[in-house]
Image (cartoon, grey):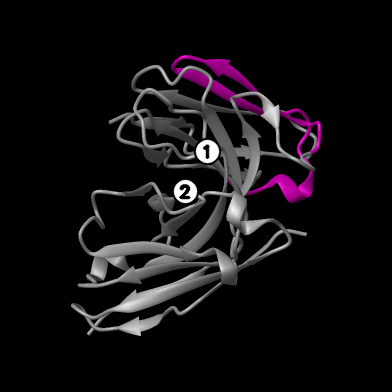
């Protein structure tokens, strides 16, 4: 089973700063990785799929990169609405299973 | 606009049963694979089950296999999760999520598959 490890657990930043979140897979997942944002009391929202493609309606300040085992979500300049928890997600090939990282909380410094 | 609305959550005793529903609108429901994902209070996300567009392929997490049953009714644009033999550790918000990707039945065909639209969730509490 592929395990996703996110770091750091918490990121304390100010609005306007750049956020860099990491997700490491225990074995290669090629480019089949997604990122989700979840705000308190809300459902998750798909931000990035296939490691680097922005989902519909996602602002350009969000970008994803990486392949194999190491992935990064970058928020170029934090807006007040970006403070939330971010999860990475991948699927195992067979049998199909989907796993999430434990999450990174981006909080206001 | 894609909308997913879950219902059926509530308080149930250990060993009890519950059936969750998800009403879909704003897209051609019969063309999409669908999923259930849950989140225990204060915890992360856990995939529960997935079903292909025509119900041909169904998959479960090990933690619920043999106890939960996913199904759908394309005529009613609805997704279901029958939960039996509930345990305290099943306590969570259950989200219905649409798939971006195709669910297959072959290990030779494993296209990327993500969850692109989510409902607001329904809380299931298992407690005596």
Q: Which residue is mark 2?
A: B52
Could you tell me residue A102's position as x and y percent? 42, 42
Subunit bearing disc 1: B
**Range shown magenta:** A59-85
Q: Is residue A44 visible?
A: no
Mark 2: few/some/many CA within 10 Å (<14, 14-19, 20+): many
Is residue A106 in the magenta section? no
Image coordinates of residue A79 in percent, x first then y, are 79, 43
Q: Nearer the viewer, residue B114 or A67?
A: B114
Q: Total marks drawn?
A: 2
Residue A60 magenta = yes
Mark drawn on residue B35: none
A96, above or below A67, in the image: below
Q: Quarter-wise, where is residue A77 in the image? A: top right
Q: Is residue A61 left or right of residue B92?
A: right
Residue B10: x %, y % from top left: 41, 82
Vertical comparison of B20 with A98: above or below: below
Q: Of the residues under marks 1 and 2, which one precedes in the sequence? A: 2
Q: Residue beneath label 1, please?
A: B102
Write the residue at 37% across / 37% down.
B105
Q: CA distance from mark 1 to mark 2?
A: 7 Å
């Amino acid at each position: 089973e592929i395990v996703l490890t996110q770091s750091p657990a918490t990121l304390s930043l100010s609005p306007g700063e750049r956020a860099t979140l990491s997700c490491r897979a225990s074995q290669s997942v090629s480019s089949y990785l997604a990122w989700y944002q979840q705000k308190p009391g809300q459902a998750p929202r798909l931000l990035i799929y296939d490691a680097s493609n922005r989902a519909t309606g996602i602002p350009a300040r969000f970008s994803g990169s990486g392949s194999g085992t190491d992935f990064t979500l970058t928020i170029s300049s934090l807006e007040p609405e970006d403070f939330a928890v971010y999860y990475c997600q991948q699927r195992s090939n067979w049998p199909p299973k989907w796993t999430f990282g434990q999450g990174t909380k981006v909080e206001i410094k | 606009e894609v909308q997913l609305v879950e219902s059926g959550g509530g308080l149930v005793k250990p060993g009890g049963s519950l059936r969750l529903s998800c009403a879909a609108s704003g897209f051609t429901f019969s063309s999409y694979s669908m999923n259930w994902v849950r989140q225990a209070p204060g915890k992360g996300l856990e995939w529960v089950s997935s079903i292909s567009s025509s119900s041909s392929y169904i998959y479960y997490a090990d933690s619920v296999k043999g106890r939960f049953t996913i199904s759908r009714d394309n005529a009613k644009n609805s997704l279901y999760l029958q939960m039996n033999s509930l345990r305290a550790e099943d306590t969570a918000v259950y989200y219905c999520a649409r798939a971006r990707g195709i669910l297959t039945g072959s290990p030779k065909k494993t296209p990327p598959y993500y969850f692109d639209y989510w409902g607001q969730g329904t809380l299931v509490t298992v407690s005596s």
